[in-house]
Structure formats: C-alpha cells, structure tokens
Amino acid sequence: MHTLTRTALMAAAALLLVACNPNNPAPELTEKRTAAVAERIAPHGQVAMEGDAMTGAVAAAGPAAARSGSDIYQSNCLACHSSGAMGAPKMGDAAAWAARIDAKGLETVYANAINGIGMMPAKGTCMNCSDDEIHAVIDYMVENSQ
Ligand code: HEC
C-alpha cells in the first residue's frame, strides 16, 4: 500500500475512534454560554400573573387597558340585557334585578354571571374579562336599574 494512503487511512480511523468514543465528554456549557442560550430561547413577552409587581411595558399596558363597566356592557352584555332576550334581567328593570339579588345575594349573582347560568353564557361572552371587570359591569347594570 502506498505510504501516503496508509497514513490517510490511519488518520481517518483515529478520527473515527475519537468521534465514537463514548467517554468523549459533550462540549461543556460554561455559565456564560448557558445564560446566552437561556436569553435566546426566552419568550419575548413576560406573563404577568395577578399579584406580580408590574414592571415596564406591562405596567403601562395593564391599568391603561382596564375597561369600565359601561364599556363592557356596551360590547358584551347589551345584546341580551337591553332587550331581555331569553329571559335576561333587563337593564333598567329594577324589579327583575332586585328579585334576583334579594333571593340569592349579590355574591351568588356575581358568581353566576362569571360561571354562566341557564341561557346566560359564562362571563356574558367576555372571556377576557377579569372577575373584577364582570363585577363592575353588574354593578353598572344594577345601579342603572334602581
Ligand atoms: C346571550 C345572551 C346574554 C349575554 C350576552 C349576557 N347575558 Fe347575562 N343573562 C342572560 C340570561 C338569559 C340570563 C338569565 C339566566 C337565568 O336566570 O336563567 C342572564 C342573567 C344575568 C345575571 C343574573 C344572574 C343571576 O344569578 O340571577 C347577571 C348578573 C348577568 N346576566 C350579567 C351579564 C353580564 C355582566 C354580561 C356581559 C359581560 C351578560 N350578562 C351578557 C343572557 C345573557
């Protein structure tokens, strides 16, 4: 065999041995590299949980985006509650609201609106409404039904 070919073959075999060696440790991740990877795969926006301290952009977007009871009423509840569709207590119908609140208590009425009751869909279709926002709309409807 030609010497050069033999050398090349031996070198290739040596490389193969190194590549296949099970004891060959994986490239080590230094602390710096780990941090860089963590930063690269981190989600762009951070989820703010209730109770978290608000920071930066989240703080700016959060409270500013809060809707009033009347805003939500107009966009989500009016369809049924202005006409009394499907037996919904009508906005302005003092007797209908008083009867419900007297019979169950306001807390139950709040909970029923959040969970849904009869033909009333959960959160009155405002799925991105917080419980507090639903409370605010109900207060708005009740205040306007005295
Ligand atoms: C698709 C129609 C519909 C929409 C939209 C709707 N409701 Fe209702 N709602 C009803 C009906 C029907 C009832 C009566 C349910 C029953 O007592 O069986 C009701 C009842 C209620 C009650 C009384 C619950 C109780 O315990 O007596 C509250 C409070 C209420 N709705 C709040 C809301 C709010 C707040 C919204 C908007 C965010 C909303 N609803 C949107 C149909 C609707």
Image (cartoon, rainbow, N blue to C red):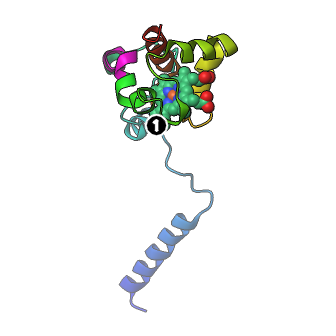
Q: Name which residue lies at 41% across and 41% down.
A: 41
Q: Is residue 60 left or right of residue 53?
A: left
The location of residue 107, given as percent across then percent down, is: 63, 13
Q: Nearer the viewer, residue 141 or 31?
A: 141
The image quadrant of residue 36 is top left
Residue at mark 1: C-beta within 8 A of ligand 1: no
The location of residue 45, given as percent across then percent down, is: 37, 31
Q: Residues within 10 Å of mark 1 (few under 14, many from 20)?
A: few
Q: Nearer the viewer, residue 115 or 32?
A: 115
Q: Is residue 111 left or right of residue 86?
A: right
Q: Amino acid at mark 1?
A: Thr
The image quadrant of residue 58 is top left
Q: Nearer the viewer, residue 65 or 79?
A: 79
Residue highlighted by disc 1: 34
Give the residues in magenta: 58-71
How many labels were placed on the picture? Answer: 1
Q: Nearer the viewer, residue 16 or 56?
A: 56
Q: Name which residue lies at 36% across and 17% down.
A: 70
Q: Is residue 127 visible?
A: no
Is the magenta region chiefly helix, strand or loop? Answer: helix
Point out the residue furthest to the bottom here: 1
The location of residue 80, given as percent across then percent down, is: 45, 32
Q: Name which residue lies at 44% across and 36% down.
A: 38
Say if 137 sits above or below 31 in the image.
above
Q: Is residue 26 visible?
A: yes
Say if 38 sits above or below 113 in the image.
below
Q: Name which residue lies at 62% across and 17% down.
A: 100
Dot 1: element: helix
The location of residue 129, given as percent across then percent down, is: 46, 26
Q: Is residue 128 magenta?
A: no
Q: Is residue 69 magenta?
A: yes
Quarter of the rendering occupied by the N terminus = bottom left
